[in-house]
Amino acid sequence: MIRPLLLVVLLAACIPGAHAQWRAQLYAGVAGSSLRGNIEAERSPIHRLSGGAGMQYQSPTGLVFEPTARYTMKGAVLDGTIDGIPVNAVEEIAYLEFPALIGYRWRGRGGFQPKVLFGPVYAIRLDANITVRPASGGTEQTEPDTTIRGADWGLALLVAGEQTLGGETLVGGISGTAGLKNVRTVDPPLRNVSIGLFVGLVF
């Protein structure tokens, strides 16, 4: 996974830099996440806050390169049975993600500039917990999930727009990721998937 990240960085660094510009950016949002895989439990997404910061390379040709670091919570709500008893379980996996996205930004009207970016994302697990309670109600029990691997990787797609107002550049859009690695050390294999909305500031 490190090799694709390095290739993206080297590609951006080799692009002619006349009038090119590096800028910083901050953003926050909310993401819905779930788990893909062949499991018997019914799944539904969890929705959690996310946010991060990074850099943005802007080329006069329209090329945009954005290496960032962001905090995000992934997982799912699982409805199944344990020893024949219906239960509700919430899997929560906290990650520090490092997307390295490259794409194109178009010149719009009135200071608005749409952009589309795509690239690899590498994630380091910060924490993993699972909360279980009987479906009929009762006491919740939260425990660390020791079956979750320490790292994940996949692909990310970002569709957004930038708007310049009063000298400030605001950004907002949709970001989605699809994990390509099994996040568990036991069967059945599961993979992360998420999509979210975000807003931020480029300066």
Image: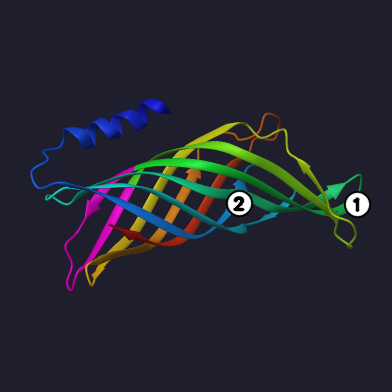
Main secondary-structure element of the magenta-colored stretch: strand
Q: Is residue 38 visible?
A: no
Residue 34: mark in rendering: 2
Q: Which element type, helix, strand or loop, lies under badge 2? A: strand
User: Which is more N-terminal, label 1 or label 2?
Assistant: 2
Left or right: 30 with respect to 162? right
Query: What is the distance, in whole Å, between disc 2 and disc 1 at their CAs?
Result: 23 Å
Q: Residue 118, percent across and down?
A: 34, 46
Residue 124 drawn in magenta: no
Q: Residue at x 40, y 49 (%)?
A: 53
Q: Amino acid at mark 2?
A: Ser
Residue 15 against residue 107 in the figure, above or below: above
Residue 140 against residue 12 in the figure, above or below: below
Start-end of magenta stretch: 101-117
Q: Which element type, helix, strand or loop, lies under badge 1? A: strand
Residue 112 drawn in magenta: yes
* 43 or 175, nearer to the observer: 175
Q: Residue at x 56, y 42 (%)?
A: 95
* 142 or 61, nearer to the observer: 142
* 34 or 21, nearer to the observer: 21
Colour mapping: rainbow
Q: Amino acid at mark 1?
A: Ile
Left or right: 10 with respect to 194? left
Q: Quadrant of residue 27?
A: bottom left
User: What residue would you read off at disc 1?
Assistant: 85
Residue 124 against residue 63 in the figure, above or below: above
